[in-house]
Amino acid sequence: MDMFCFQCEQTAKGEACTSVGVCGKNSNVSNLQDDLINSIIELVNCGKESEIITDLIIRGLFTTITNVNFDEKSIKELITAIKNQINCQNNFNIKNIWNNNDDTKSLKALILFGLKGMAAYAYHAKILGYEDKTINSFFYKALRDISKELSTDELFNLALKVGEVNLKCMELLDKANTETYGQPVPTKITTNILPGPFIVISGHDLRDLELLLEQTKNKGINIYTHGEMLPCHSYPKLNKYPHLKGNFGTAWQNQQKEFDNIPGAILFTTNCIMPVKNSYADRVFTTSIVHYPNITHIGEDKNFEPVIEKALELGGYNETQNFTGINGGNILTSGFAHNTVLSIKDKILEAINSNSIKHIFLVGGCDGAKTGRNYYTNFVKQTPDNSIVLTLACGKYRFNDLDLKDINGIPRLLDLGQCNDAYSAIKIAVELAKSLNCSVNNLPLSIILSWYEQKAVCILLSLLYLGIENIRLGPTLPAFVSPNIWKLLVEKFKIKQISTPENDLKDILSSY
């Protein structure tokens, strides 16, 4: 076995990648990422907490998320920086977890992968100057506990604690984003690309987009979002830039086809970057946590001049390109975060009480290339006309170009934003439940999640921490969840795997 990795939904044979990652990382990168985790846990076991160490922990965990870093050199540099902070004698080897009994391995993986996802959210908040000492300290405690011999009950409770702290972390990031860039407002976004030089910016980082917009002002370069950057159009302090024009392409897993010979520059700010093809390698740039071999990286100075020069050199398209989403639509609407939705709460409640809205579906999460994800397109297409669909994260690209009409002026499809905007969905559900004098579980609400990487894991843990039941998860079950732990989740939370859109809709609607 050259490597062992089973942290993403597409892991080989639904078991584990053992020679090369389905994501494209080689065994050297995978093993270096394991060494990075080993070093982080050795560091936290020294007992010292500091701003420098916290930054290294968060960066290190984020670096090991799927489709973030494929570059051996940068990972080695981070390992060295961490080892330079270790001042005690202790050893940790992640292989000891993978070689454990199935249930212990399962729960420790759930905790570790959840921490990786939460680190991404903590990183984005920190970039904007927002931190929380209790969140930071929890990283230390949880990582220390992973190296201990704990019972199944202790590990299960720790996994739910990850969910609790992640909820607080998503709230912190929501505060960071909205206080910095304003409350999102519903915004229509075109998929058409205008003639002339342009830059496509992918990932999740709002600050990187702001800096790029500032540096490209009055230079005749248009900026287009990609993937999870789509919701950035709805933030007033970002949308004020007239050269932020629209959205390029669909979900992240289609980039190798959609970026083929693209006459523009591409900037990756966070995941998800796929192995870069030769046809566009010369126009790809990375920044922040993202690294890829032989690709120009923009450092902490955030000088995007190389990206700008490449965009001007390539020149863009000669005429407007009329691109569409996967269902043929060319207008996407985002910006229905909690502030917007709750501003019309009375209207929604009136529609619920009059049976104009009989059901609410939350259909969202990560997208991916594995077969079976058309389930989410077909599910949304078949939702009744008297229902609304909340969505978030890149899974929405399966259906966000559909025109589902509206109910009494309320759009049937409401895009809440990025994956971390699961916080918006939770806040909306909690406030509706309060107004209807019921629990979230008694709302006419069903949650259908698609998962791919570790941010989806921490969001799921947050939902479980809140005691939310009857979540449907797909397209496949996590390889790292053992049969016994899955049984436990079913017993405690009635969680289930998706089947077919027809059967799941019939089952859901018959219960209300």
Image (spheres, rainbow, N blue to C red):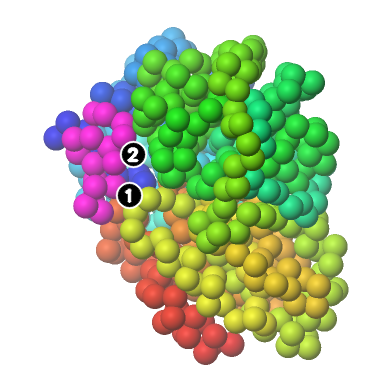
The earlier-in-sequence mark between 1 and 2 is: 1
Look at mark 2 in the image and give the residue it sits on.
Answer: 23
| Residue 167 image label | none
Q: How many residues crowd around disc 1 within 10 Å: few (fewer than 14), some, or many (20 or more)?
A: many
**Quarter of the view holding residue 512:** bottom right
> Residue 137's x, y, as percent?
58, 33
The image shows residue 97, relative to residue 480, as above or below, that is: above
- Residue 67 shown left or right of residue 482 in the figure: right
Q: CA distance from mark 1 to mark 2?
A: 8 Å
Give, as a three-letter code, the residue at label 2: Cys
Task: Tell me which segment is drawn in magenta.
Answer: 9-27
> Residue 233's x, y, as percent?
73, 43
The image shows residue 331, relative to residue 291, as above or below, that is: below
| Residue 10 image label | 1
Q: Please report the residue visible at 85 percent of the width from the left and 73 percent of the height from the top.
A: 346
The image shows residue 403, relative to residue 76, as above or below, that is: below
Q: Identify the image quadrant of the N terminus.
A: top left
Q: Nearer the viewer, residue 195 or 208?
A: 195
Q: Please report the residue visible at 27 percent of the width from the left and 63 percent of the height from the top.
A: 483
**Quarter of the view holding residue 429:** bottom right
Give, as a three-letter code, the residue at label 1: Gln
> Residue 27's x, y, as percent?
24, 28
- Residue 258 shown left or right of residue 413 in the figure: left
Q: Nearer the viewer, residue 60 or 147?
A: 60
Query: What residue occupies the far left of the structure in this picture?
Result: 1
The image shows residue 426, relative to residue 292, as above or below, that is: below
**Quarter of the view holding residue 442:** bottom right
Q: Nearer the viewer, residue 151 or 76?
A: 76
Q: How many residues crowd around disc 2 within 10 Å: few (fewer than 14), some, or many (20 or more)?
A: many
Q: Is residue 306 visible?
A: yes
**Disc 1 to disc 2: CB gap under 8 Å:** yes
